[in-house]
Amino acid sequence: MIAQEGLAAMLALSPVVPVLTIDDAGHAVPLARALLAGGIGVVEVTLRTEAALGAIAAMVAEVPAMLVGAGTVLTADQYRAVEMAGAKFVVSPGSSAGVLDAAARSKIPFLPGAATPTEVLALLELGYRLQKFFPAEPAGGISMLKAIGAPIAEVRFCPTGGIGLGNAPDYLALANVMCVGGSWLTPAEAMRAGDWQRIAVLAAEAAELNLRRRPRN
Ligand code: 3PG
């Protein structure tokens, strides 16, 4: 049984899920607080750095109001490790057999990545109605999502890759997009400098995208 139970409600918390790459676990708590101060209550911490697991654990322990997911989960071992660290959901750029198996055995939901109709259908066959569309811009962006949505209307996406404040509203206007992901809220130089005020401002701009969404029927 494939569990995406609870995932739609988690991703509905924010129009934008910041994709975080954290080099220093000591940054995790002030960063989560800055994003929360700006109105963003859900994040994806990528497993691209040594600090990632510690950052997840620190955020979960010290910033309980932030919903912390793990991203760039490429193996079954990583899936288990992020679950142990306290992540509440898992994101992958694709969907390997090993990660799908780990997801099926896990208590935390999985957002697998897809970029083509065949990949989308393979995941749908396993029960995944929520998918990450990655890499969004190189894979065809808005026109690709519209084209996939015509025949495969039951899958909703969180597109990520090449999205920023400028094009996010156009993605969020699509019927098959429930949120977007992106790293633009956490510029590398602001992270290095610990410029949490700047990140809070970028978060506030992103959180406002919700207000500009078209009403859904
Ligand atoms: C991801 O990990 O989902 C993407 O690499 C984030 O893409 P971006 O840096 O273009 O926002």
Image: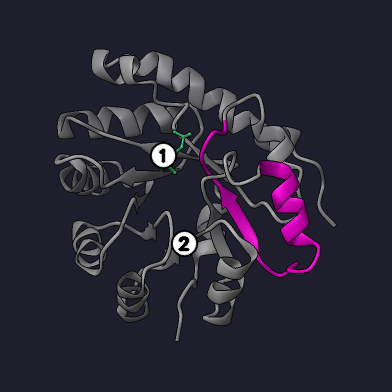
In x, y percent, where is residue 149?
75, 60
In x, y percent, where is residue 163?
57, 33
Mark-to-mark CA distance, 2 and 1: 14 Å
- Residue bearing mark 1: 19
Please tell me in which quadrant of the rendered image residue 49 appears: top left
- Residue bearing mark 2: 111
Q: Residues within 10 Å of mark 1 (few under 14, many from 20)?
A: many
Residue, x 60% and y 42% (percent of image)?
Answer: 15
Q: Quadrant of the N terminus?
A: bottom left
Looking at the rendered structure, the kind of residue marked 2 is Leu
Looking at the image, residue 87 lies above or below residue 155: above
From this viewpoint, which residue is outermost toward the bottom?
1
Q: Residues within 10 Å of mark 2 (few under 14, many from 20)?
A: many
Please tell me in which quadrant of the rendered image residue 136 appears: top right
- Residue 1 is left or right of residue 31, and the answer is right
Mark sitting earlier along the chain (2/1): 1
In x, y percent, where is residue 116?
60, 60
Looking at the image, residue 85 lies above or below residue 106: above
Give the extent of the magenta segment: 141-163
Helix, strand or loop at mark 2: strand
The answer as to whether callout 1 falls within 8 Å of ligand 1 is yes
Q: Nearer the viewer, residue 130 or 8?
A: 130
Residue, x 33% and y 20% (percent of image)?
Answer: 188
Question: Colour scheme of this structure image?
Answer: one colour
